[in-house]
Amino acid sequence: MNGRSELGVAALLGALAVIVAVDTANIRHTAVNAGVMGPQVVPTIIAIGLALCAIALAISVLRGGHGDPEDGEDIDLSIPAHWPTVFGLAGLILGYALVLDPLGYVIASSILFYGSALLLGSRRYVWALVIGILLSLGTFYGFVLGLGIMLPAGLLTGIL
């Protein structure tokens, strides 16, 4: 590459800023969301922040700045991706989206965590399942009790 590939990232940030700004401009004021600040304040701040980051990155790249290449830590970058793992994870995520409502958040998320752990090489089968269940339950109750956001209970309706 010619050393200007970071301009694509700056363009992406700029596009995101425009999308957020347009969506923010289309927020309707209603009696429910009317308040001191209104519903447009935070998205406007985010859009401005994205735009400033895009401009700063573009200026930096045009002045000769560039990101350092990834050393990959303990990853050998000459080895190609293991496509069965990539497609397996993609399939798990697609399956998660399909079974989230009927099975519920806790069961679907436990399966997603467990399957991901196995696909990524874990051989601690019981431990991965226990961690998946605990993370799912903790997240479920954090949203439901802590934030008041209802997640689908699915098969566990009435139990959770």
Image (tube, helix red, strand yellow):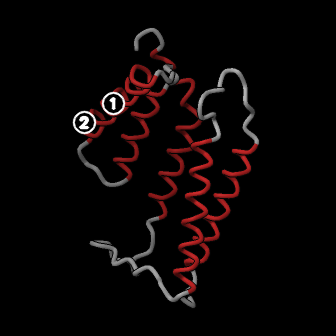
* Residue at 50% in and 24% down: 149
Query: To which quarter of the image does residue 138 belong?
Result: top left
Judged from the image, the secondary structure of the residue bearing numbered disc 1 is helix
Q: Nearer the viewer, residue 49 or 90?
A: 49
Point out the tag, 1 or 2, that comes first from the N-terminus: 2
* Residue at 69% in and 51% down: 21
* Residue at 44% in and 58% down: 85
Any mark on residue 73, and which? none
**Residue 133 x/y as whole percent:** 33, 30
**Residue 77 x/y as whole percent:** 38, 77
| Mark 2 residue type | Val
Question: Does residue 75 sit above or below 160 in this rendering?
Answer: below
**Residue 132 x/y as whole percent:** 33, 35
Q: Residues under labels 1 and 2: Cα distance? A: 11 Å
In the picture, measured across the screen, residue 51 lies left or right of residue 87, that is right
Quadrant the N terminus occupies: bottom right
Q: Residues within 10 Å of mark 1 (few under 14, many from 20)?
A: many
| Mark 1 residue type | Ile
Judged from the image, the secondary structure of the residue bearing numbered disc 2 is helix
Q: Nearer the viewer, residue 151 or 156?
A: 151
Q: Nearer the viewer, residue 100 or 139?
A: 139
Q: Residue furthest top?
A: 158
Question: Does residue 16 sit above or below 81 in this rendering?
Answer: above
* Residue at 74% in and 50% down: 22
Any mark on residue 133, and which? 1
Whether label 1 touches label 2, CB < 8 Å: no
In the picture, measured across the screen, residue 139 lies left or right of residue 96, that is left
Residue occupied by mark 2:
126
* Front of the two marks 1 and 2: 1
**Residue 4 x/y as whole percent:** 57, 84
